[in-house]
Amino acid sequence: MNKGDDTWAAWAMREGRWKLLIDTTGERSALYDLTTDRAEAMKARYEALGGKFTVKIVPGEGHKIGPSFFACPELVDFLRSVAK
């Protein structure tokens, strides 16, 4: 799987430290060890500190940061709430 190419997965399953992604045909899959996944580590740390962590998936956007990222009302509200 190419880094940043996360738009192919249709289903995800989690069990313990593992996350499995599968496409609609079952021909493509990827298994992730959540203990080494930076996003999962960030989520766990943020939640351990009492924060609320939400993931919003924008269809077709993947992990890229573009106009839809900055136009996301939830992100803007979050940034305003923590800006000091």
Image (cartoon, rainbow, N blue to C red):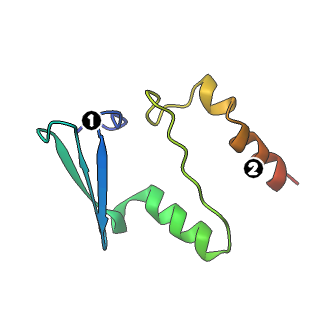
Q: Residue furthest right?
A: 84
Distance of label 2 from label 1 (alpha carbons): 30 Å
Image spot of residue 11 (x, y percent):
29, 47
Q: Is residue 73 left or right of residue 48?
A: right
Question: Helix, strand, or loop for circle 1?
Answer: loop
Q: Nearer the viewer, mark 2 or mark 1?
A: 2
Residue displayed at 56% across by 70% down? 45
Image spot of residue 25 (x, y percent):
15, 36
Residue displayed at 58% across by 25% down? 66
Image spot of residue 22 (x, y percent):
22, 45
What mark, if any, has residue 78 been given in the picture?
A: 2
Residue displayed at 34% across by 64% down? 34
> From the image, which quarter does the C terminus lie in?
bottom right
Earlier along the polypeptide chain: callout 2 or callout 1? Answer: 1
Amino acid at dot 2: Phe
**Dot 1 corresponds to which residue?**
2
